[in-house]
Image: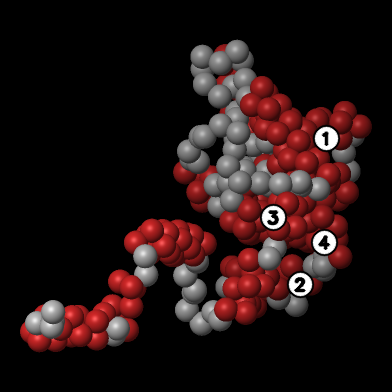
Amino acid sequence: MPLNPSRSRAKDRSSSVLGQAEFLSLNVPLRNNRAWRRSGQSKTHQNQQNEIPLEPGENVKERGETTKLPDEDCMLLNPAFRGIAINSLLAIDVCLSKRLGVCIHTTSSWGSMRSAVTLLALTGHGFTWICGTLVCLTQSSTLAGQEVLINLLIALILDVLTVAGFQKLVQRKGPWYISPGFLDCVALDTYSFPAAHASRAAMVSKFLLSHLVLAVPLRVLLVLWAILVGLSHVLLGQHHLTDVVCGFTLGFLHFSLMEKVWLSSGACQTLISIGTFSWGSVH
């Protein structure tokens, strides 16, 4: 029985349409087509998860080099012995400094001594020493005394500027948060490391022991004063023990530097004449 021409033409048209590129997947069996789709979707999803967007100006070669760094990541998880030792010492320093902060408040264990310790710390303040040196300089009438006082004033200014620079660079906070007072802001003593009072006390005591004739009891008291001034801010909770040790070291370095650049009597008289505008008195 002859086929219907309209049906045969419709069959040929459908086969030609299915033969196009976008309909080739319809000729694949249903089961295989679904499996291919699942495998393609899983690979695409896996590639999207593993893919990391490139930074601006970064090529594929650089990305390949940066991703192959498992050893360095493992090294970060295994710090060196030196790092462990330093961190342990810092932890001990913080713990001991907090335990020694017994005069922080009036309710502390040594709260009744807070006023005396604060007064002792004030004797090592930079503002106190600079003002006291200027007063003594105006009252001094001997060339030797003026020479010593001028060099002491320069050493104090050097100490204040150097300690302030180190404190701004390191910006270490004290073991207890205590807002700096007015005199601390004037003397640029707002951070913990290094301890400005310890540096100044060490420098001043060494300076006076070297350039003043003092009896043995006064020399012992001067050394004891320097040690107590350095420890006073630890008791007040403003400095760590390492801050005080580094402050003492820095104070001795300031003294050694001042001894090398010591100004003579003539240079000191020139500075005094410039400061007092008495040019005619200079010989």
Q: Which residue is mark 2?
A: 267
Observer-side mark, 2 or 3, equals: 3
Q: Assign a secondary structure to mark 3.
A: helix
Nearer-N-terminus badge (2/1): 1
Nearer-N-terminus badge (1/4): 1
Where in the figure is residue 22, as x and y percent of width and height?
A: 29, 80
| Type of amino acid under label 2 | Ala
Q: Which residue is mark 4?
A: 257
Q: Which residue is mark 1?
A: 223
Observer-side mark, 3 or 4, equals: 3
| Type of amino acid under label 4 | Leu
| Alpha-carbon span between mark 3 and mark 4 | 45 Å
| Type of amino acid under label 3 | Asp
Q: Nearer the viewer, residue 243 or 26?
A: 26
Question: From this viewpoint, is residue 95 visible?
Answer: yes
Where in the figure is residue 120, as x and y percent of width and height?
A: 65, 30
Q: Nearer the viewer, residue 91 or 111?
A: 91
Nearer-N-terminus badge (4/2): 4
Observer-side mark, 1 or 3, equals: 3
